[in-house]
Amino acid sequence: MVVVMLPRRLFSAFLQASRRLATSPTTDGGYPKTEGAWPDDRWRSFLLPSRAHFASNCNTVVASRLQERTLIAVKPDGVQRRLVGEIIQRFEQRGFKLVGMKLIKASEDLLREHYIDLKRKPFYPSLIQYMNSGPIVVMVWEGYNVVKTSRLMVGATDPAEALPGTIRGDFGMHISRNVIHASDSVEVADREIGLWFSSIEMTDWECCTQSNIYSG
Ligand code: UDP
Ligand code: MG
């Protein structure tokens, strides 16, 4: 009997400990909560790392999401129309952090590579020519969900369809002169940042408002 009871007690204690350890922390690190009924949560407790494990990785998990980066470029029409300051202000006010910026006249080769996915589109040659027609301001912005949020801030590709309040909706003229570029996925952002910036051209810095912006 003792032989049967002992493993059951140990098993039960282990279950309770697992649930306690896997309780969600207060930070939103994408770590699921454990409320709910048996058996789902109990099994999830087994599958998830313990609180101790999470605690040691918490900063990494949360930081990797907070440190999402995207490539934003003010196109030649935006620079000519003196919209650089306005655009930077929108990203700053939204709470994102500028980690890289330069004003350059991009080479055709770089632009062709940047827009490689569009190379079969009829507008590709004119797009490259236009992007090469004058200086552009290329930036890397960092923050939670910055890729998705910046696409919303930028608005639809065609300014005629972009909502008022978006950058293209407020300043865009025509689909071929739509003021700004923003990476459209995290994978694309990684590729584009690697294309336009070397690591020494970007600066990691501590933002003193970090806790005001992100702590819940
Ligand atoms: N573009 C264009 N004509 C079109 C569609 C796109 O000149 O019919 C240009 C426009 O400048 C756009 C860029 O090509 O921003 C890249 O197109 P994409 O579909 O990736 O749009 P985005 O991601 O910039 O909204
Ligand atoms: Mg695109």
Image (tube, helix red, strand yellow):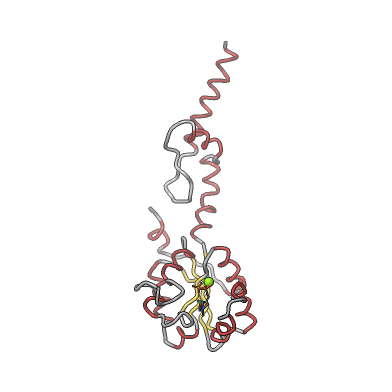
Q: Residue 148 at x, y = what percent? A: 47, 63
The residue at the far right in this view is: 109
The residue at the far left in this view is: 164
Q: Residue 57 at x, y = what percent? A: 55, 49
State which quarter of the image contains the N terminus: top right
Q: Nearer the viewer, residue 56 or 28?
A: 28
Residue at the image position 40 percent from the left and 73 percent from the top: 161
Locate residue 153: give its quadrant: bottom left
Is residue 77 shown above or below 15?
below
Residue at the image position 58 percent from the left and 77 percent from the top: 121
Locate residue 174: give its quadrant: bottom left
Is residue 198 shown above or below 31?
below
Is residue 165 shown above or below 48?
below
Residue at the image position 53 percent from the left and 74 percent from the top: 100
Q: How many marks?
A: 0
Locate residue 83: give its quadrant: bottom left
Q: Residue 72 at x, y = what percent? A: 50, 74
The residue at the far front in this view is: 122
Q: Residue 35 at x, y = what percent? A: 42, 37
